Amino acid sequence: MPTLHDRLTSKSLTLIASLPSNHEDVIQAAIDAEVDVIKVHMNVEHRASGNWFGTLAENERAFTFLRKHFNGPIGIVPGDAPEKVTKKELDQLQEIGFDFLSIYAHTAPAWLAADNQLEKMIALSNHYRQADLEAFKQSSADILEASIMNSETYGQRLTMNDLYHYQELVAGVSQPVVVPTQKNILIEDIQALQATGISGLMAGAIVTGKTPETIYESLKTFKEAIETERM
């Protein structure tokens, strides 16, 4: 099966679903929408969705369901603080069948830089500096997640200034860049987003809502729009 990195470097734009909960009906909605990649969370308080995601033990059944029913790459945010990410749980996640980790650089424990069990999608925040991009390019990170919006702007419309920042990231690193929907990205924004050179769009609660019905409809619409751009 192709890895996340494989997909990001072989398609014009990869659609990643970042789920607002780990309920099986939410997972199924993303699968039915035919997204390319699915990401879930554990040990995390998630601002965009307003949810607390529980422990691995609490989520293991849902994660097993995800792996059983979805053939694409699956990833996980393993925690929102360095002490919440452990090698033991990474081993368990790999056994379940996860393909990649998604985590902020400032919440990832240092030892993770030398751990290559799973691909690493590392997020930079709005505090990144130009020097960080050169360091990122030389790091063990496989993918850059552009989580660079100030939390005060979450849910606002995407602007040309935002596109310039994404272009700066694409130009500054050698890894593929994924943009999460920290802002309210619309279908009509996709062409302009693609023009920045990003490799993936990660659709989360701000654009999908939280119910299986809205998640399916939103993801399906994004999927169809991206497929149209590929033609």
Image (cartoon, grey):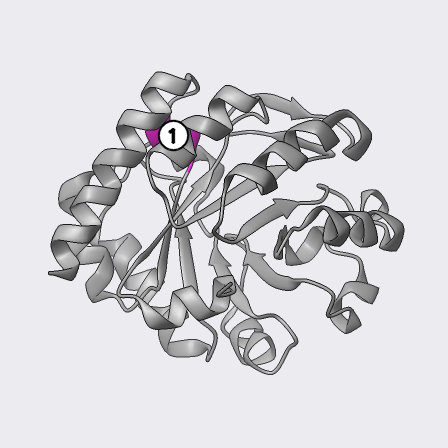
What is the magenta segment's predominant secondary structure? helix
Give the percent coordinates (x, y) of residue 82.
Answer: 80, 49
Q: Is residue 108 visible?
A: yes
Horizontal side, residue 93 vs residue 122: left or right? right
Query: Above or below — where is 122 with respect to 136?
Result: above
Horizontal side, residue 111 vs residue 206: left or right? right
In terms of secondary structure, where does tag 1 sit? helix
Query: Above or below — where is 22 with respect to 107?
Result: above
Whether 76 is among the magenta residues is: no
Q: Nearer the viewer, residue 36 or 113?
A: 36
Give the percent coordinates (x, y) of residue 215.
Answer: 36, 26
Q: Is residue 154 visible?
A: no
Q: Residue at x 49, y 68 (%)?
A: 5
Q: Residue at x 73, y 55 (%)?
A: 108
Q: Which residue is mark 1?
A: 206
Q: Nearer the viewer, residue 15 or 50?
A: 15
What is the span of residues highlighted in magenta in the rendered image? 204-208
Outermost residue toward the front in this view: 68
Q: Amino acid at mark 1?
A: Ile
Q: Residue at x 50, y 33 (%)?
A: 19
Give the percent coordinates (x, y) of residue 109.
Answer: 80, 57
Image quadrant in which you'd find residue 139: bottom right
Whether 207 is among the magenta residues is: yes
Q: Residues within 10 Å of mark 1 (few under 14, many from 20)?
A: some
Query: Above or below — where is 112 with respect to 54?
Result: below
Q: Residue at x 26, y 55 (%)?
A: 161
